[in-house]
Image: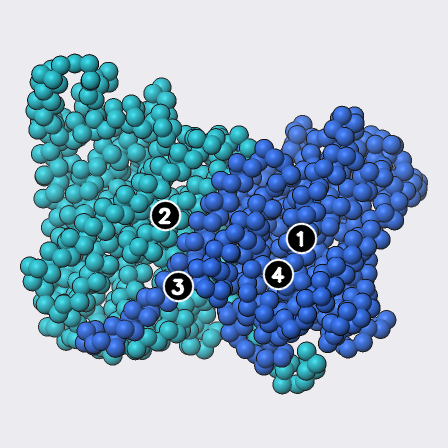
Chain colours: A cyan, B blue
Amino acid sequence: MEAMNDNSTLYDLAMNLESSHSQVIPITMFIAVLCLCLVIGHLLEEYRWVNESITAILIGCVAGTIILCTSKWKSSRLLTFNEELFFIYLLPPIIFNAGFQVKKKQFFHNLFPIMLFGVAGVFISTSIVAAGSWWLFPKLGFEGLTISDYLSIGTIFSSTDTVCTLQVLNQDETPLLYSLVFGEGVVNDATSVVLFNAVQKMNADTLNGQTALRIFVDFLYLFSMSTILGVTAGLVTAFILKGLYFGRHSSVREIALMVLVAYLSYMLAELFELSGILTVFFAGVLMSHYSWHNVTESSRITTRYAFATLSFIAETFIFLYVGMDALDYAKWKTSTISFGTKMGIYCTVMLLILLGRAVFVFPLSVITNYMYRSGGESAKITGQHQMVIWWAGLMRGAVSVALAFKQAFFCNISVLFCNSHFTHSGVTLDPTNATMITTTIVIVLFSTVVFGFLTKPLIDHLLPPNSNTTRVSRDPGPKEDMTLPLMSLEESASENLSRAKDNLSMLMDRPVYTIHSYWRRFDTAYMRPIFGGPSENDNDASC
Amino acid sequence: MEAMNDNSTLYDLAMNLESSHSQVIPITMFIAVLCLCLVIGHLLEEYRWVNESITAILIGCVAGTIILCTSKWKSSRLLTFNEELFFIYLLPPIIFNAGFQVKKKQFFHNLFPIMLFGVAGVFISTSIVAAGSWWLFPKLGFEGLTISDYLSIGTIFSSTDTVCTLQVLNQDETPLLYSLVFGEGVVNDATSVVLFNAVQKMNADTLNGQTALRIFVDFLYLFSMSTILGVTAGLVTAFILKGLYFGRHSSVREIALMVLVAYLSYMLAELFELSGILTVFFAGVLMSHYSWHNVTESSRITTRYAFATLSFIAETFIFLYVGMDALDYAKWKTSTISFGTKMGIYCTVMLLILLGRAVFVFPLSVITNYMYRSGGESAKITGQHQMVIWWAGLMRGAVSVALAFKQAFFCNISVLFCNSHFTHSGVTLDPTNATMITTTIVIVLFSTVVFGFLTKPLIDHLLPPNSNTTRVSRDPGPKEDMTLPLMSLEESASENLSRAKDNLSMLMDRPVYTIHSYWRRFDTAYMRPIFGGPSENDNDASC
């Protein structure tokens, strides 16, 4: 301290203050740009085809240009992309909110097609994109990728971003379509991250049946364990809130408990190397199904809007970042590939995405229609619907970018021998990885801006507003016998057996409705008394 | 990538994964402990004297002990204290919420005593503690501190933490007392941070009249500029929300805008080296006075509870941390001072805090009573009230700890020649600074646990519940002539002059009421039409 007046020490002090300010300046500017996004997004709200994502990306590009000019072509970014920032802070609120806000009745009713599109679809799309790039990239002169890299490319470009489409679709006019697109979007996010992690764990250079099986088993393990963890977190919260009646003392503590347990489940999943995204999604679903009904009225309103706000800010943040990052000069320079090859790669990937999605959407829709054949005309996924679903999943978003950075990070640490400054400096030194990241950014930008822009006209063309109003919510099938007990101890064994036979034949005939009706009876009889939930009266309103 | 199977590379990969996990593990555990705090805090709610702060500190101590044992006496902390984490992420929500939730009518009505206690009080208390420690520390054998250090000690131990007291006081039974304690707490937080920064800027070794004047001028500049920035941020938000009618499209965007502008104002203040704490406090006050009335009903409920929740989590986080940090073995070892001297220092500081507060509370109460002499008996700060106010400000909390770390950081960078790893490693190498930090932690622990524990019995003794009910809200004084225009262009100059004379005599006679009534008329006539606000009818309910 005696040295306080020493010149060199003062210089150090100044240096240190400057470096502490170097964090304050970008955060300040980023928040200022976020505020600008909010206001402009609001002003453009009238024009439904210019949605939040496009606004944020374009503002990001403009801000990037300004920064690029003022920094004399050095950098276009305020914050370097840190995949930890994304996976630890930005993604959880988005996914938790998705689970929390999903219309559970519709979601569980359409669970079968949603899982089919969201899980099987990702597998099919990944195979197509991986195989296509493995076949075509070397022909374009882009070589040096391993099998694991191609599979990563497959998963990176199979994660959809349905924010655009959801802003255009109307939940009341086309409930089936909305729930399919929304549900697929959520499950797809989770599946692609889980699959990506499974692929990353694989360290074989060739892909044979055994490796594929191992990836699949890994995937199943991750999927089921993550779901169990999320469900447990949701149930524990519901039990605590109901058992201890938190609302008696303060709403604040209720809200804090929900947020913290949800985040805890995400972090626990990450700790056990499971899929935090899936865990926090199911935690959200369970919390809104049980916990939400155990809290005070103010807490209900607050959680609904506060979670949506957090998610909204995180999403805008990501798109803004992508827009800024697109102009990052250093990244474009690092990539050693010629302009023609680059264009070739972008077009190839774009075509593979279009193809990969078409290959699963149309056949899987046919399967779904077969399964729901007893649901009548209104339950069918029509040709127009199939087109919309196909189009809805063409946009690529934040998850793709995050996975691309993660991939580059994984490759870099193996090449650069644990260069811990990688994520801080944000420079992708490897030309191949630089190409990967620029490709991802170009695809995200192009698909969000161009495809997103065309979504509104396309939907208006395929589903003219006047015809939509006739489509009502999917018929929930024949009325279930809600008084039918799940299993009765008072009846004789033979009666139970004959009932079991009836149920089995019903299960074969209308599998989805039967499972759903069983679940609802089980929920009402056993779950709700323990974990809380809506009373039967306001069942329809709350689901 | 070809090297993926290489052993050394895999080792690096493992290392890196571990280092990335080294962040996941502490966050996970910290959140788990936070959840535990919530549940235990709820269960202990019945016993009002065991408040949230005490619970969090004690749980922190227990968790610290467990970590200390499992880590084999290496560390008791999950996260190292980063003053940036505190000042950039934890403090803003707490202060913003304080501004947002403050009962503005009471606050502005008692603005004079609040400012007197919160600003003049800090100056007096700082002088007493600084002078006392300058006089007594060398006698105890603790030397090597500069004048600037003593002044820093003064400000560190002048920042109060009134969370404890507010949990015990009843807003309806003793509105005057509650508003004084709460208001002082907020202004005190801001003042001590501002004063601390002013002292840090000073780099003279001796304290003379000129230096003291410079500190005071610096303080005035920081105080006024910060206030202006906060007020501007609040007005801009109100104007945007009213002018563009955000609620038309989405509640989410309204809430996001309020949060982001508030945070932006804080960061801007930090960027311009003003007091972010004061800025964000006034942004909160203005937002709840104007903006809050321009948003939809759901946004109102959400903001009220969401901000409170954020603040609650941040506060619990800090107390939990203080509890854990108390057991940090390394810090206690670094301090080279003998046990006796340490005890001497703790007792001295404790006594100085008691004295420093007594010296300003009682005389300033007398001044306040003189100023409010026309308010009748109910407006008087009685002897019992003075005792409660004195006691309420004896607890030391998060701000003290943060300032102590900041002080250590400032000294360290001047001694250690810009050791940028300081805040990351969290080790305070300088023995003097280690002593400073341990002293602060001991004082915070002792005052929060012991004084906090005694607050409830003391208040019960001084203000028996049955006598409280007779005390009503401070009489708002004679009815103001709300129809009286602020300045009339239609009247003659002489009439205006005579009115000005009347006003002036009124100002001399009842200064506080007159200013307050002027402000209310100005607010109704000019501000509310532009920035929005409650209509006259629901004025009393909303303030």
Chain letter for the residue marked with disc 3 in the picture: B
- The correct choice, above or below, for B456 with respect to A415 in the image is above
Which residue is disc 3 drawn over? B22
Label 2 and label 1: CA atoms lie apart by 35 Å
Which residue is disc 4 drawn over? B402
Q: Is residue B409 left or right of residue B121?
A: left
Q: Circle 3 sits in a helix, a strand or a loop, which is it?
A: helix
Label 1 and label 4: CA atoms lie apart by 17 Å
Which residue is disc 2 drawn over? A265
Tag 4 near tag 3, CB within 8 Å = no
Give the class, few, some or many, for how many residues have Cα within 10 Å of label 3's Cα (few <14, many ≥20). Answer: few
Q: Is residue A260 left or right of residue B351?
A: left
Q: Is circle 4 on the same chain as circle 3? A: yes
Chain letter for the residue marked with disc 4 in the picture: B
Which residue is disc 1 drawn over? B446
Label 2 amino acid?
Answer: Ser
